Image (cartoon, rainbow, N blue to C red):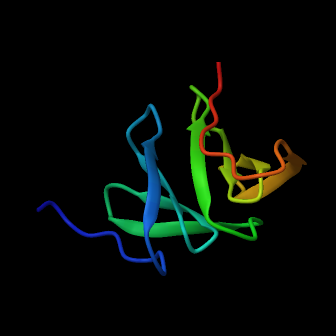
Amino acid sequence: MLGELKGHGWGVTQLAATTDGKRLISTGTDATVRIWDIASQTESAQLIGHEGPVFGLSITRNGREAVTVDRYGILQHWRLDTAQSRGSLKVHDKAAWAVAFT
């Protein structure tokens, strides 16, 4: 094992790395999105805004933004450099399981 990332209070649902290979983004059933520094294996930020388990995650190619979707059909748009939400949108009446940038 190369290491361990500790932080989510329960299960991890998605993991994605930025294209520069420096950061890992995780989503969890604890309603959080977390940014990890791969080199130091430490959490650099928590993205707070979901009210339920987060199931879907997609990162832009330039690694500056991400979108996530949750159990309640809410999409959150994030700026990864500031760890702030750019806004949210209700995309479904039930859970949203996946999201993708194209």
Compared with residue 82, is residue 96 higher up or lower down, i.e. above or below? above
List x then y, in percent, for residue 7. Answer: 45, 77
Residue positioned 47% across, 57% down in the render = 13
Residue positioned 58% across, 44% down in the render = 57
Q: Quadrant of residue 53?
A: bottom right
Residue positioned 33% across, 65% down in the render = 41
Judged left or right of residue 42, residue 78 is right
| Quadrant containing the C terminus in the rendered view | top right
- Residue at the limit of the structure toward the front, as seen here: 94
- Residue at the limit of the structure toward the bottom, as seen here: 9
Residue positioned 57% across, 26% down in the render = 61
List x then y, in percent, for residue 83. Answer: 70, 59
Residue 81 can be seen, yes or no: no
Q: Quadrant of residue 82?
A: bottom right
Compared with residue 59, is residue 12 higher up or lower down, i.e. above or below? below
- Residue at the limit of the structure toward the left, as seen here: 1
List x then y, in percent, for residue 24. Answer: 44, 51
List x then y, in percent, for residue 87. Answer: 88, 50
Judged left or right of residue 26, residue 32 is right
In-front residue for pair 12/80: 12
